[in-house]
Amino acid sequence: MARAVALAVEAGRLAREAGRIPLRSWGEASSPALGLPDLAEP
C-alpha cells in the first residue's frame, strides 16, 4: 500500500513537471481522410 502511494505521488509530480498541453483553436484529425467512405451522398 505504501509503495502504491509513493508511486502515485511520483506520477503526480512528473505530470506537474510535464506541464499542460498547449491549446489550439482548431482540431486535427488523428486518422487520414484518404480511404474513408463519403457518407454525405446517398
Image (cartoon, grey):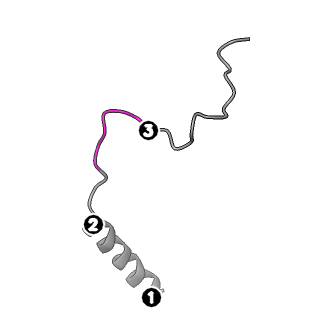
Magenta segment: does it hold 5?
no
Q: CA distance from mark 2 to mark 3?
A: 25 Å
Q: Which residue is mark 1?
A: 3
Main SS, magenta residues: loop
Mark 2 crowdedness (10 Å alpha carbons): few <14, some 14-19, many ≥20: few
Q: Quadrant of residue 12?
A: bottom left
Provide the residue span drawn in magenta. 22-28
Q: Quadrant of residue 16?
A: bottom left
Badge number at residue 28: 3
Q: Quadrant of residue 8?
A: bottom left
Magenta segment: does it hold 26?
yes
Specify whether 29 is left or right of 7.
right
Q: Which residue is mark 2?
A: 16
Quadrant in which the C terminus is drawn: top right
Q: Indicate the amino acid at tag 3.
A: Glu
Residue 28 in picture, x, y percent from top left? 43, 38
Mark 1 vs 3: CB contact within 8 A: no
Q: Is residue 6 above or below residue 14?
A: below
Residue 5 in picture, x, y percent from top left? 41, 81
Quick one: 1 or 26, which is closer to the camera? 26
